[in-house]
Image: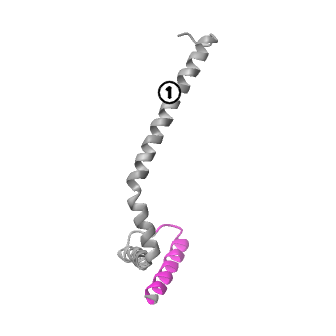
Amino acid sequence: GNILDVALVVLGICSDIAMLATDTELEGGGAWKVIRLLRVLRTLRILRTVKSVREFQKMLYALMSSTRTLLCSLLILGFVMYFFAVLLCQAVAEFAVDQGEISP
């Protein structure tokens, strides 16, 4: 666990130093790809730890179960905004025609 973290930090520092020394990105060597993959695995390990927290699971479940309702609400809000935008455009166009700024 902690050994993997230490190894990844040391290898990350080494890769940063190598990039600074050569002033370029390291060309896709296999070892560097493995280091990047190990970093991703480290992130996934954090997610596994988060899964064990019961309160976080409850919050995630609440968010997932309310997604449909949220999307429907956003759709209705979009229709209302569109309706008032059309009304405003019509009112501005009529005002401009009445003022003689544009022809009908």
Q: Position of residue 104 (x, y in %)?
A: 53, 10
- Residue wearing tag 1: 86
- The residue shown at (47%, 84%) is 5
- Reply above or below: 75 against 3: above
Quick one: which residue is furthest to the right in this view? 99
The amino acid marked with disc number 1 is Val
- The residue shown at (50%, 67%) is 24
- The residue shown at (49%, 78%) is 12
- The residue shown at (40%, 73%) is 40
Quick one: which residue is furthest to the bottom in this view? 3
Q: Where is residue 22 in the image (x, y as percent from the top left)?
A: 52, 71
Name the residue nearer the viewer: 17 or 50: 50
Quick one: which residue is furthest to the left in this view? 30
Q: Quadrant of the N terminus?
A: bottom left
The residue segment tinted magenta is 3-25
Q: Where is residue 65 in the image (x, y as percent from the top left)?
A: 38, 60
The secondary element bearing badge 1 is classed as helix
Q: Is residue 11 magenta?
A: yes
Residue 57, by quadrant, is: bottom left
- Reply above or below: 75 against 33: above
Main SS of the magenta segment? helix
Q: Where is residue 35 in the image (x, y as percent from the top left)?
A: 41, 77
Name the residue nearer the viewer: 6 or 44: 44
Q: Does the magenta stretch include residue 22?
A: yes
Specify few, some or many for label 1: CA neighbours under 10 Å numbering under 14, 14-19, or 20 or more: few
